[in-house]
Amino acid sequence: MSISRKDFFKQSLFSLGKTALDIAETLKGHLPVLPAVPMGEPPVGEPRPDLVAEAFNDRCLARSNQCSACVESCKPAAIKINPGVGIRINPQFCNGCGVCEYVCPVDPKAVVLIPR
């Protein structure tokens, strides 16, 4: 039997996928069914004039240019990346909506809302 290299790899990948599906189907009956956890709604982003965002650059991933989640999510463009330092928040533009704190991936958060 002579098959091309392309057909050989295609059959190999197909059989690998079929085997993975067979294993998953077998394990499906042995795994406990967990109750669905309702996910909270993301923040609406309603402006809160009594709050302002504050940056904690010692834990911010933007220092090493690995993150820009808060900058991308800030509708009033109050957050700027300062390379090597972290982020800078302009309190005059910040509307206190809290989306930046919500999307911050580090724990504890590098951006938190504080009273003005």
Image: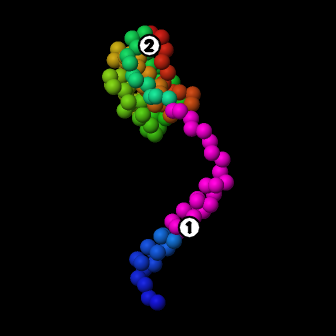
- Amino acid at pointer 2: Leu
**31 sits to left or right of 7:** right
- Give the vertical position of 109 relative to 29 (above or below): above
- Give the vertical position of 115 relative to 87 (above or below): above
Q: First in sequence, mark 2 or 1: give its number.
A: 1
Neighbours of disc 2 within 10 Å: few (<14), some (14-19), many (20+): some
Q: Is residue 11 magenta?
A: no
**Most foreground residue, 113 or 48:** 48
Secondary structure at badge 2 equals strand
In the rendered structure, which segment of residues is drawn in magenta? 16-39
- Give the vertical position of 13 relative to 76 (above or below): below
Secondary structure at badge 1 equals helix
Q: Which residue is mark 2?
A: 51
Q: Residue at x 43, y 9 (%)?
A: 50
Q: Which residue is mark 1?
A: 19
Residue 43 image point, x, y percent: 44, 25
User: Disc 2 to disc 1, how far (Cα)?
Assistant: 55 Å
Residue 24 image point, x, y percent: 58, 59
Q: Residue at x 46, y 28 (%)?
A: 41
Q: Residue at x 63, y 45 (%)?
A: 33
Snapshot colouring:
rainbow
**Most foreground residue, 45 or 78:** 45
> Could you tell me how many numbered marks the image carries?
2
- Amino acid at pointer 1: Thr
**Most foreground residue, 71 or 84:** 71
Asked whether residue 56 appears in the rendered view, the answer is yes
